[in-house]
Image (tube, rainbow, N blue to C red):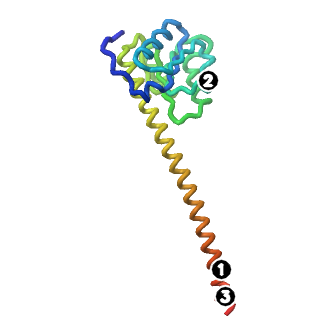
Amino acid sequence: MENDNLPAQPSRELAKMKILIVDDEPANLALLEALLTSSGYVNVKPVRDSRLVVDTCKSFEPDLILLDLMMPNLDGFGVLAGVRAEIADGFLPVVVLTADVTERTKMRALRASATDFLTKPFDHTEVLVRIANLLEMRRLHRFLDNQRAAFEDALRARTAELREVTSQMEELAMPCCATAIVR
């Protein structure tokens, strides 16, 4: 279902983030790609063959994946399992888009570590809002990971400095203590 009341353009930072679209139907790929690019996203990559997703993730390094569940060769559940097993990433959001509206499929996808679940036909505004929200979460996760890594580096450097100062102090104290023992 299309909604002409589309959300505002994504921020410049979010617009540059990478979005991978996985669907075996060319029309669905074209629709999602057009929706995203017309909304301001500039790094959108469609993949039609689900067997290529893990390798594509390794080279493209997406910030978000839009994933169809019903595909030949390797279904969306298999893709999701492969991505989670092969891609070492703290937080890579995966939004499942499917025509299967059963509660069983929804729960199966969410239990398989899908981040969100939307049914086709989808509301364009809802998809764009959820994408923007998940990309912002991804951005914040990466920021926190970078801050944590910088803090750990600074802590290691400071610990090494303290060990060096302690060692120097012990060396300076040794002659004093040795003389006191001899007397």
Residue sitting farthest toward the bottom:
183
What is the three-letter code of the residue carrying label 3? Answer: Thr
Residue sitting farthest toward the right:
182
Q: Name which of mark 3 and mark 2 comes first in the sequence.
A: 2
Percent x, y for residue 122? 39, 13
Task: Label 1: state its secondary structure.
Answer: helix
Q: Is residue 99 in sight in this rendering?
A: no
Dot label at residue 54: 2
Percent x, y for residue 28? 48, 9
What is the three-letter code of the residue carrying label 1? Answer: Met
**Which residue position holds label 3?**
179
Q: Who's the residue at 59% across and 34% down the image?
A: 88
**Which residue position holds label 1?**
174
As drawn, 47 above or below 12:
above
Q: Nearer the viewer, mark 3 or mark 2?
A: 3
Task: Label 2: state its secondary structure.
Answer: helix
Tell me the CA gap for discs 1 and 2: 60 Å
Q: Is residue 124 in sight in this rendering?
A: yes
Q: Name which of mark 3 and mark 1 comes first in the sequence.
A: 1
Percent x, y for residue 102? 43, 15
In depth, the one of 71 and 34 nearer the eye is 34
What is the three-letter code of the residue carrying label 2? Answer: Val
Dot label at residue 135: none
Badge 1 crowding class, 10 Å Cα cut-off, few under 14, some 14 to 19, many 20 or more, is: few
Q: Nearer the viewer, mark 1 or mark 2?
A: 1
